Image (spheres, coloured by chain):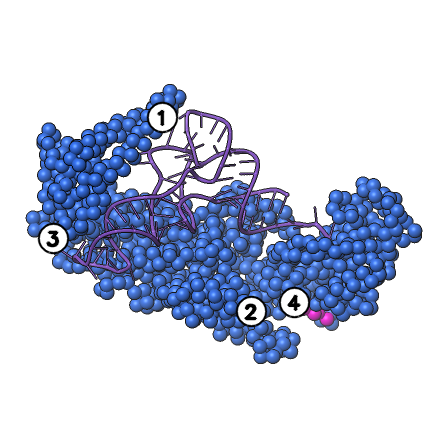
Amino acid sequence: MDSSFDPHAIEQSLYSSWEAADYFAPAGNGPSYCVLIPPPNVTGTLHMGHAFNQTLMDTLIRYQRMKGSRTLWQMGTDHAGIATQMLVERQLNEQGIKRHDLGRSEFIERVWQWRAESGGTIEQQIRRMGSSLDWSRDRFTMDDDYARAVQQVFETLYDEGLIYRGQRLVNWDPQLGTAISDLEVENTDEQGHMWHFRYPLAEGLKTADGADYLTVATTRPETMLGDTAVAVHPDDPRYQGLVGGRVILPLANREIPIIADDYVDMEFGTGCVKITPAHDFNDNEVGQRHGLPLLNIFTTEARINTNAPEPYQGLSREEARRTVVADLDNAGLLERIEDHALKVPRGDRSGAIIEPLLTDQWFVKIAPLAEPAVAAVENGDIEFVPKQYENVYFAWMRNIQDWCISRQQWWGHQIPAYYDDQGNIYVAASEDAARQKYQLDDHVQLRRDEDVLETWFSSALWPFATLGWPDETADLDTYLPTDTLITGHDIIFFWVARMIMMTLHFTQRIPFKTVYIHGLVRDADGQKMSKTKGNGLDPLDFIDGVSLEDLLDKRTQSLTQPKMAERIAKTTRKDFPEGIPSYGTDALRFTFCALATTGRDVRFDLSRIESNRNFCNKLWNATKFVLINTEDLDLQAEMELSPIDRWMQSKCHTLINELEFALSTYRFDIFAARIHEFAWHEYCDWYVELSKPMLWDDNISPAVKNGIRHSLLEVLEALLRLAHPVMPFITETLWQQVAPRLQRQSDSIMVQAYPMATDYPLDEAAEAQIEWLKAVISAVRNIRGEADIKPKQSVKLLLQHGNAEDRERAAATESMLQRLAHVDTLEWLADDAEAPPHALALVGDLKVMVPLAGLIDIGAEIARLNKELDKVQQDLQRINAKLSNENFVGKAPAEVVAKEKEKAADLETRQVALQEQRAKLEKLA
RNA sequence: AGGCGCGUAGCUCAGUUGGUUAGAGCGCUGCCUUGACAUGGCAGAGGUCGGCGGUUCGAAUCCGCCCGUGCCUACCA
C-alpha cells in the first residue's frame, strides 16, 4: 500500500464496477425504502447544493441498503422550462438567431438537441459524488409516459373544476414575455423615489383647507396614465365632501372619480391614493370593490400602448416615467420628489422588473387541494425534520393563492386545451380525444392552446408519475408512500407542498413520510453562492482539485455583468491563492455530513474538508498498520482476547448504537463526528498504540497476540462498514483488503450487512481497566510534557496508595504503560514508605509519581502543582457552597446531593495530597 | 410589519428531558521525523455561553424584555 491515500486512483473505477454489477437497483425482500431525488435541471451542472443534498440522500440509501431494505432511489431530471429555454435562446442569440426566426417546432427540436448534448453532464457529475442511484429507471419530466401523467392530471383537475382559465392580473415578466407565479417573484430592496403630484379637482371642488387639487404620491409615475380613480379613507375629515366628486387626471385629461376605501392609510402621505386597477394588485382589489374600469396601458413588452395618450405610446416604462414626470413638472403639478426605499418585484430567472398585467391564464384552484395537504402534516402522517418547518408550511398553505400555471413559452408540456372559433374550451389529451369527449363535429375548427405548463406543475407529480402512474403498477404499491424526502428549505413551497397536494389528490396516499430539510450551502463568509457574485464553488473542484488559473477562468467567464470580473478575480486570488487541492469524494461527503446540523445553513470552509481528507488518510494508514501486523494471522489457532480487545469491542458496541440513533434522527453531523472520534481517537490513538507493545513483546503468548490481531481486524472491518454510507470509496478499497484476512469475501462492501451492536460484546470491566490505564498514561505524559522531558528520555515510575485492583491492573498492562508513557521501570511503594522527591499526579487514590532525579525542575513542578491545585480548589469551593446551601440539600434530589458530596470528598483528598506534595517540594527548593 | 431562526473558545459549529470541571474540528503555543500516518504524534493555552431581569436548591438550557444578525411572508401608494 502507498504511504498516503490517493482518491484518484480508486473512485471512478469503483463506481463503474458498482454500477456494472447492478448494486444500485432494488434488491432483496426486505422492507421497501425509497428516496425521491429532487430532479436536477437536465441541462444543468452540479453545484454545492446538489452535492450536499446528494451526500445526505446517498448516505441514507447506502445505510438502508446495508440494513437489508429493498431500496429504491431512482435517477431523474427536470426539463426546467424557463431555465432551459433561456439557455438555448442565449446560445441561439450568440449565433445571431432569434427564437421566433426558427419557429416553435424547430426551436423545440433545438432544445432536445441541447438536452442530448449536455444532459449527460450532470449525470456524470452525480456519479462522481458516489451516489448509488438506480440509473436504469432514469426518468425525465418530458418523457412520453411522464407527459401522459401530466395531461391526465391537467384534464382531471379541469373536469373537477379545479383548473380554470381566467383573465386576471398576473405577474408578468416583460423580458421573458410570460406570466410567472407569485413564488417566482423576488422582492428586492431598492432605492427609489416618491413623486407627489397634484390632480386638479373638477367642478370647482375644494378640499377642507381650500386647495383646488388633491396631492397623490406614487413610486411609479408612469402608471398614472392608467389611473381610474383617486381613493381617500372614508373617515378622513380632510376629504369628506369630495367623495363622489371627480378629479381631472392630468396628461390624460380624463375625469376620474374620488372614492372612499378602507385600504387607504390616512396617516401615510397625503391620504390620497391614485388607483390603477390594471397595474397594481392592491389597486385591482379596490377597483373590484368599486366597479372601476381597468385601463391597461402596457404592452407585453411593458411599453405604453394605445390606451394612453398619443405622445406616450411606444415608450418603455423607463422613458414613460421620465416623460410623465417632466410633463407634470412643466404643468406645475409636480409638488415634490422624495427619496424612498421600496421593494421591487423581479423575476427570479430574468431579474427583470415584474409588471402586474391583465392577461388570460390558467389557474389551479388551490384551496381544495391545500386542505387535505395541511391535514396530512397536522395529523402526523407527514413529518418535517426539523419540526419548525411545519409552521412555515402551514403558514403558506393556509394563506395560499390560486396558482398560475400557464407560461407563454415553448419548452414544456403544452397545455392540452383546444378552442373553437367562439372561444369555447375543450380539454383533452389530443385533438381527437377532445372531439370525441365533447362530441364535436368534424367541421368545428379547433386550435390548441399555445402555452405550456410551468415546470413545477409537472414536478409536483414526481412521486407518482415516476412510479408509473396513471397505470396501476407494482412499483406504486411497493414504494408509495416513499420514505424520506431530502431537500433544501428554499423549495418547500415550490415543490414539497405541491407534491403533497397532488399526490394526495391523485393517489389518496401521502408522497413521503418524512421531509428532511437541510440548509443552504454558503461560502466561508456566509454569503449565498451565486454566479454573479463569482463566489460559487464547483463540487468537482474539491474532488479533483483545480488550479488558480482554471478557477479564475470559471468564475469570470460568461458573466452577466462583465465589470464584476476584476473584483471576482481579486477575491478568488485572495481566497484560493494556490487554487484548490484535490480532496476526493469521500472527504467532500464526510464534510457535508459533518456540517449537516439541524436545518441551518452551512458555511463551506476549506479547513473542514482538508481535515477530513486527512481523516481519510488516517483510515488508510491505520489499515496499512493492521495489514502489516496481521499477515501471519491464523484464524484457526488458539486465541485469547486481552482487555484492550474487549475494551475496543465494547466501545464498538456503543458506537454502533450511537450511529443508529444518529441516523434515525437525521443527525448526520453526529454520525460523522462519532465515526471520526472513534476511528481516530479511540482506535488509532489508543487501540493501535496499545497493541504495539503487546504484539512486539516476546513475553506475550501467541494466543493473546492472535487475539489482538483478530480483534484489530474485526473492529477495523466493522468500522469500514459503519463508515461506508458516508465515505463509500475508501471504505470499499480498504475493506477489500481487510475482509479477506477474516475470510470474508465479497465483491463489494456496499452489499454487506450493516454491523450490529450485539456482535461486539459490552464489557464494563475491560472498559474500566483500559480507562484506568489511559488515565495513568495520560498522567505521566502530562508530567513529562509540562516538565519538558524529551520524548527519548525514559523515566522511572513509582506507584503508591493503590488498592488491589490498581495493582492487578498495573500488572496486566505494564508493558503498554511502559511504552506509551515511555517509562523504563515501574515500582510500587509501600503505603508508609517515603518516596524520593518526585512529580505527582493522582488517579483516584492512586499516586502516580515520577522521581525528579535531575530530570524535572522543582520550580516547574511546583507551578504545575499549583495549576492543578487551583482547579481543585475552585471546584471544591463551588461544591461546598452548594452543599452548605440548605435549600439545595433540602430540595434537590437525594442522588444529586449524594453525588456532590462524593465529589467534595474526592476533591478534598486530592487537595490534601497536592498541598502536602507542594510543601515537600517547597522545602527542597 | 408579522413569522421563524441564530448569537457558546480567534474561526466554524455541537451541547438530547434544567443537575460532574460547557465539548469538537480548524487555528494558536511548546516538544518530537520512535519500525501505519508530518495529510502525523504528545503536551498545553484559550470561553463572565449577546445584555438585563425573572422562575428554580440549581439556567448555555425554561420565561420576559432589550441589542445584534439572518431568512421567509406580506406590504403604505
The residue pinned by badge 3 equals A696
Dot 2: element: helix
Q: Which residue is mark 1?
A: A882
Give left or right: position of A665 versus A110. Answer: left
The alpha-carbon separation of the residues under discs 3 and 4 comes to 76 Å
Q: Which chain is purple?
A: B
Q: Nearer the viewer, residue A59 or A357?
A: A357
Write the residue at 65% across / 51% down: A401
Label ID, residue A175:
4
What is the chain letter for disc 4?
Answer: A
Q: Which residues are magenta?
A: A445-451
Pick the quarter of the image with the C terminus of chain A.
top left
A507 horizontally vs A46: left or right: right
Could one spot residue A760 in this view of the protein?
A: no
- Do the residues at pointers 2 and 1 share their chain? yes
Q: Amino acid at mark 3?
A: Trp
Chain letter of disc 3 in the image: A
Q: Earlier in the sequence, mark 4 or mark 1?
A: 4
Separation of marks 3 and 1 at Cα, in angstroms = 51 Å
Provide the chain ID for the residue under circle 2: A
Please determine whether, in this image, residue A262 is positioned above or below residue A580.
above
Q: Residue at x 66, y 61 (%)?
A: A353
